[in-house]
Amino acid sequence: MARKILCVAEKPAIARAVATHLSGGAFQTHAIRGNQYVKNYEFDFNFGGAWGTCSVTMTSVVGHLTGLDFDRQYKGWMSCPPGSLFEAPVQETVDKDKLPIADNIRNQAKYSKALFIWTDCDREGEHIGSEVRNQAKAGNARIEVKRAKFSNTESAHVRRAALEPVNLDEYQASAVAARIELDLRIGAAFTRLQTLQLQTVVAALKEKVISYGKLSIMIDISKRINKLGSCQFPTLGFVVDRYLRVQNFKPETFWGIKVILSREGKKVNFLWKRVHLFDRAVVTMMLERCLLAKQARVTKVNQKPTSKWRPLPLTTVDLQMMGSRFLRLDSQTIMKVAEALYTKGFISYPRTETDQFDKGIDLKKLVEKQYPDSSWGQYARELIDGKFRTPRSGRHNDKAHPPIHPVSWVSPNQLNANEKKVYEFVVRRFLACCSDDAKGQSTEIEIQYGDEFFHTNGLIVLERNYLDVYVYDKWESSQQLPNFERGELFEPTEANIFDGKTTAPSYLTEPELIGLMDANGIGTDATMAEHIAKIKEREYVAINERGGGRSSVQEFIPTRLGVALVEGYDNVVEGLPNSVSLSKPFLRKEMELRMLEICSGTKTRQEVVQQSLDMYREVFIHTQRRINMLKAACRKYLVEETGS
DNA sequence: GCAAGGTC
């Protein structure tokens, strides 16, 4: 009898895709009891080498199988002081709704020689793999465990993954286990403390849970940014920061000088090197000196070739930011759509930090696959006929997934409206990466007029190259400049004063927020969108629509609760004795670094958990001691709302 | 009633 191999994917759609490719479409489908999504697919496959042809059962889990929670006696909010959750015993159990899935794996394992794990190739996937392994071993202690390594569901790629299995990465699984325990203990302890304390303060908070997790991230980041002196932008801390700047903004009037020359039937505007000043009298005096000089002298004529660079290979964060901007989809929608496109085998795995292509990947072949398309097929052909360029390389590589790229062509009428938009973006971006930069000629003219300097710039686009396919970038020729020669004198046609008012910064937008979260290591590329959705749901921020129609932008405005919490925590943290250690424990980035230490084997899971808990415990005790600061801030901002 | 991360 043929040996049996059990294969388990992270989600049903991948199980189906893998089964389809390995079996060539000839497989049997069996439902399992107790779960409508998970199916068992059965077929034969030749794994080669020592395995040879085996009968395969391909099934899946639905994300994580297990969850971590406190022992029963600690579950009630009043059962213990919140601080004791740092030590309270915890248990890993299979989630109730996942029990049938776990049963299925244990049963199938009984008859299997080996388990092949087909979870996504990232850290969480490695942990989910370990959960699957535990169930399989519970069913069959002697089962051999392997792991398939793949980053898209293109047929040849999947088959190769089946032939070249590797081992599960225990370090990565441990790193995730550490994160899970820390998130639970810290999140629960602070949330209970905060909620129990604040709900007695104002009626508005009575029924509310004031969750801690996302909040702490936000507050701490704003502090850290301030410390670094670059308090430019956004999460709640970012949102509040910007909000306060908008609120406190007072417009100021400024004045400047503009110089105009009409020559060869063209009107040239020269811009002042000082841009503008806030003192009218001074500007008037400067203009008078210009006029007194009568003639202006050309001090610089710079003509040089210039180019606009093609974009870098596409990462998740970039996809979300560009999507918000150009596709008019919020980041959560984009990720859902991209996930669907990946599952159907049209694009590569959409969660990646990598912005460089591997040398091994056959990019031209991927370009060729786009030939049938009526919009960009011709462009793809031109690339292969000689215009192809090796993509630029960015500086990021997560060593798990390539940049997001199309893996096969799909006819637009097989996609819904949003899928079409996202697929088109991914393809155009990919083709742009494989194109040449746009080339042009820039001209810079500088003049001296009296004691003041002015300049003007011209641009002629000579070769559009990647711009032809990447419609999201704009780079256009300016009006052509008349001829100027260095040293020549001329009398300006016009020179006068203009005035204007400084305008308030605008509230934070989604792409800005994503950019900041990314720069500060908040969340994973897959979860940033959810964090944003969560802070809306928790009513820490509200959304405001600025402008109307197609050009409208969503901006974030903190609620009173949001402002109160930021100010309150600012005050709480103010008094921490050691200013270095204060900011550290809150930081997700710190957590990320420690997880990487586990992944590289320099620290154990237990070490990291203990050290982190010690740090957070210190902050917790401090917060408890200064809880009145938090209460005071809530009173200040929320008391008025109680009537309404 | 708490977290974050998977996925349906």
Image (cartoon, rainbow, N blue to C red):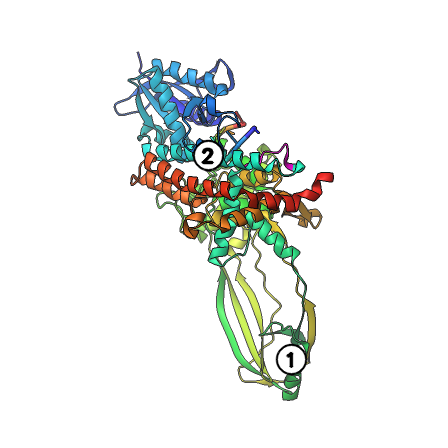
Q: Nearer the viewer, residue A300 or A305?
A: A300
Q: Quadrant of residue A330?
A: top right
Q: Nearer the viewer, residue A135 or A152?
A: A135
Q: Residue furthest top?
A: A1
| Residue A300 visible, this angle | yes
Q: Secondary structure at mark 1?
A: helix
Residue ID for mark 2:
A83
Residue A280: x and y in percent read 68, 76
In the image, residue A8 sits, relative to residue A526, either above or below, namely above
Chain part drawn in magenta: A205-211
Q: Chain of mark 2?
A: A
Residue A220: x and y in percent read 49, 47
Q: Nearer the viewer, residue A626 or A574?
A: A626
Q: Residue furthest left?
A: A50
- Give the amino acid type for the residue marked by disc 1 in the picture: Val
Kindly identify which numbered label has been placed on residue A282.
Answer: 1
Badge 1 density bin: few <14, some 14–19, many ≥20, Cα 10 Å: few
| Residue A556 on the magenta segment | no
Q: Is residue A55 left or right of residue A370?
A: left
Q: Is residue A625 left or right of residue A140?
A: right
Residue A30: x and y in percent read 47, 14
Q: Is residue A493 left or right of residue A631?
A: right
Residue occupying the point 52% across, 78% down: A300
Q: Nearer the viewer, mark 1 or mark 2?
A: 2
- Give the amino acid type for the residue marked by disc 2 in the picture: Gly
In the image, residue A122 sits, relative to residue A68, either above or below, namely below
Kindly identify which numbered label has been placed on residue A429.
Answer: none
Residue occupying the point 66% across, 65% down: A502
Determine the main secondary structure of the stretch shown in magenta. loop
In the image, residue A453 sits, relative to residue A399, either above or below, namely below
Q: CA distance from mark 1 to mark 2?
A: 63 Å
Residue A636: x and y in percent read 64, 47
